[in-house]
Amino acid sequence: MKFGASTFIWVSPFSNDTLDLIDKVKNMGFDYIEICIEDPQTIDTASIRNRLNQTGVEALVCGAFGANRDISSEDSGIREKGVEYIKTCIDIAAELNSPLVSGPMYSATGKTRLLSPAEKKQQWDWAVENMRIVADYAESKGIKLAVEPLNRFETDFINTVEQGLDFLEKVDRDNVGLLLDTFHMNLEEKNIPDAIKRAGSKLFNFHSCENDRGTPGTGHIPWNDVFQALNEISYDGPVVIESFTTEIKEIARAVSQWRPLAPSQDSIGSDGLRFLKRVVSS
Amino acid sequence: MLKYSYDSLVYYGEDVEKSIERLAKFGYDAIELVGEPDNYDTKQVRKLVSDYGISVSSICSIYNEQRDLAHPDPAKRRQAIDYVKRVADMSAEVGAPVMIVAPTACMKTSSLADIEDEIKWAIEGIREGGEYAAKLNVKLCIEAWNRYETYMLNRLDQAIDMMKKVNLPNVGIMGDTFHMNIEEADIAEAIRKSGDALIHIHFADSNRAAPGMGHIDFAPILKALKEINYQGYVTFEILPAAADPFGVMRRGGGQEFFDNYTKKCIDYIKSIEKAIAKGDEIQ
């Protein structure tokens, strides 16, 4: 099993100023760095690739979906920008050799409206139509897309694996699967291991986060059962620790993280990885 | 034996007699009323609960923009403190021993002033409300909410810290298993650590549906309540799965929260309580 750390644990946005993070996660023992593309302008793929080659760390690309990049927006201009943004992420993924682009790409994060069935259907139709466009574009570059369900406080669109699979069925493209995150699953799934098994071969990426997004192993996520489920479905994709730094106020607000969740951000990575490796080997 | 109550918040728009009748029918000891004093004829409520043989466990206060104890504007804070006092009056009138107090507005996720100042104002407001309630023999419990509903108190230890600063014998804290599932490392341990400070608790499963419909293991939680010799009510506060559950109810959703979940909640937790009691006997 190969493990990754999200750049969000330490920074936002990722840029050439923070390339040393690649060395940091390497020294901690991670195989992947999941780079979140908040602003494509700050991403210098040549420098990143250089550092990846030096360290042997592999890249995973993850999108950040703000209000102006929303493939299911009522505003056609914003839908268009959403499609363009995902395509840019796909280009970056191809340049960094990331097999995946991940994230809640169906909508803008934080949209938690109460929609009528007709409005909901319209939103889904737009998302499905645009997902096909970006999926075909990704296919041409050999990239897969991993769609992430979020909890009810972050989206009204896809909260559970069941809804995610329903979405995939409508999109109907083989290179589109799911990213599951145990933090969100802890709120929404009746049974986390069962939900993982339900995703089966459609699971493309996995975020191993504690119930409070603190260090994995310090809360009540049933880690043994989680990894047993991953084993049962022969999951061979990345297992990524994602948390957020509370030192950057905008990010803290965006994910509602108000208190430090560990003694240091480094410990979320290093202690978390040590714990997860122990669970896997036991 | 635990005492059971159900938060009538989810019986949105229903006549209170119907709610009381339902809870009595399914074996509840009490009802939790919504902290909207204008919506109740308290004398009538007092008579109704007595007629149906139950009581009022508590008042679920509603803290919104207009009722923000931590607001930087002193006039707004005064308004919030007045609200706390009105709910204290209502509690005394319907015979509820406990009312919920929150230090700031629900769904307010960024502070309007320096957070230390806001916390100080909240403490002052809770203290003034607490002193008023003490004369009516009503207790206040400070509630922590999950990170998406407030920036101020997310964990029980933060609520206890605030309680200590308020420093009144009739002010304690409460827990809510839905919020705790997101925020606490170990729900049962957080209850044990709270000890005597815990004077009220809300039960809901991890997805805020009836216990048994999500993945929270309630056995260790019930054991922890026993260990701390918890004397309060176990009150089910379950809500539709949305960032704005009240919006769902306003639109006529959440019908399963009436008969269906009301029965499920008490049957499920009582069966665990029974199993634990049996286990204790064997030992």
Image (spheres, coloured by chain):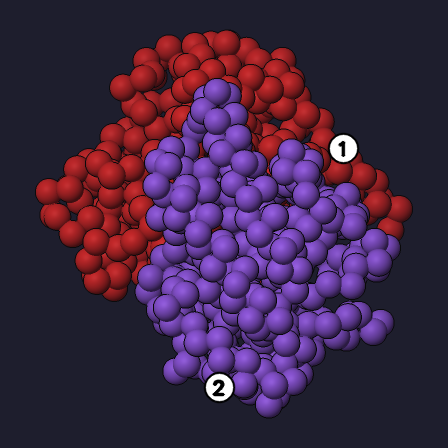
Chain colours: A purple, B red
Q: Is residue A171 visible?
A: yes
Query: Residue A132, percent across and down?
Result: 59, 42
Query: Does residue A95 lie above or below B64 as drawn?
Result: below
Q: Are marks 2 and 1 in contact (CB under 8 Å)?
A: no
Instruction: Tell me: residue B63, above or below residue A227.
Output: above
Task: Pinpoint residue B168: horizontal percent, then vertical percent.
Answer: 33, 53
Give the class, few, some or many, for how many residues have Cα within 10 Å of label 1's Cα (few <14, many ≥20).
few
The amino acid sitting under disc 1 is: Ser
Dot 2 crowding, Cα within 10 Å, few <14, some 14–19, many 20+ = few
Residue at 32% x, 13% y: name it.
B41
In the image, what residue occupies the spot 45% across and 38% down?
A72
Name the foreground residue: B200 vs A225. Answer: A225
Q: Which residue is mark 1?
A: B271
Residue drawn at (41%, 20%) of the image = B250
Farthest right residue in view: B282
User: Tag 1's secondary structure?
Assistant: helix
* Quarter of the rendering occupied by the N terminus of chain B: top right
For disc 2, the marked residue is A20
Viewer-nearest residue: A270 or B200? A270
The subunit letter for the residue under badge 2 reads A
Q: Secondary structure at mark 2?
A: helix
Q: How far, Cα to Cα, is label 2 from label 1?
A: 55 Å
Chain hosting mark 1: B
Left or right side of B258 for A166: right
